[in-house]
Amino acid sequence: MDKTWVAVIAVVLLVIIAAGWVFYATAGAPMLADWLAQRARFADPGRAEPLYRWSLAVNPYAASVRLSLCGLYRQQGKEQQAEVLLLEGITHYATGPDLYMALAAMYADSSRLEEACALLDGAPEGYLSRRIGTLRPDNAAAPPSGTYAAGLPFPLDGGEGTPWYRLNDGPWTMYGAPLALQEGEYTLRVVTLDEGSIPSPVDEYRYRVEKLEQASALQWLTTCPFCGGTWQSGK
């Protein structure tokens, strides 16, 4: 065979191989990943996991596939594997808020509210952080920081979900009724979870609570040392 024809055939083969690689990289890989994920959705759990894994190996940026595999892990009680899967996606492949929101909700469901809020607060500046901010609920409000008389109620009002609070170094507790604080100094942290367990930003309040002073020798008259008001306290 003439050397010219050999060279032409070699060039044509290289062009075909290059075109095939470009097609696979731009269209073939996502199509294969989608096909594998679709098969996984209709497979039993034992077969679904390797199919999801293969799909992610082909296209690790597929957030929906990662979330599906995470959901499968959580149904099987494999919380640690689900967390690792989401962290991997957030660290290397996240282009939108979905993985952040899923992991934050997972932390909140496990009473890891500090970690849930820190994850969302730490999203990269720019579109991603702004988008996450629009998806978080408004927080309930407590009375402003300051000095108060003992025995006054401290309600948590408003918000777009269920308020939780942490008083000093105590545990996070679901809010049920206004707090009644005795004498002392307090740091109150408040966060609100929406129906999907997505947390609001944490708000922090600092209080100094002091005992009321007697207004006179009349034991049933009491005055507030901060506002100057006087009222009957039990007569």
Image (cartoon, rainbow, N blue to C red):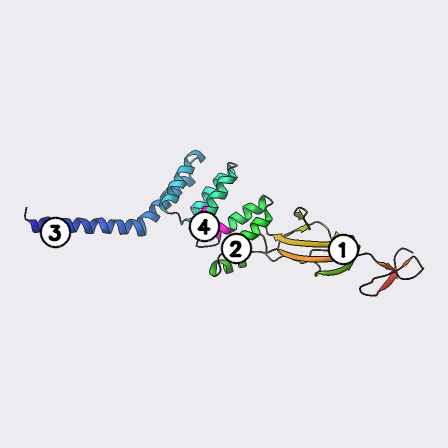
Residue designated by label 1:
153
Please state the horizontal and vertical placement of residue 192, each as a whole percent of the image.
62, 53
Toward the top, the furthest residue is: 46
Magenta residue check for 133: no
Please, what is the three-letter code of the amino acid marked with disc 4?
A: Thr
Disc 1 packing (10 Å; few <14; some 14–19; many ≥20): some
Magenta residue check for 97: yes
Toward the left, the furthest residue is: 2
Tags 3 and 4 in contact by the CB under 8 Å rule?
Answer: no
Disc 4 packing (10 Å; few <14; some 14–19; many ≥20): few
Residue designated by label 2:
122
| Marks 3/4: CA–CA distance | 46 Å
Residue range corresponding to the magenta coloring = 88-100
Residue designated by label 3:
8
Disc 3 packing (10 Å; few <14; some 14–19; many ≥20): few
Tags 4 and 1 in contact by the CB under 8 Å rule?
Answer: no
For marks 4 and 2 on the same chain, the one whose residue lies earlier in the sequence:
4
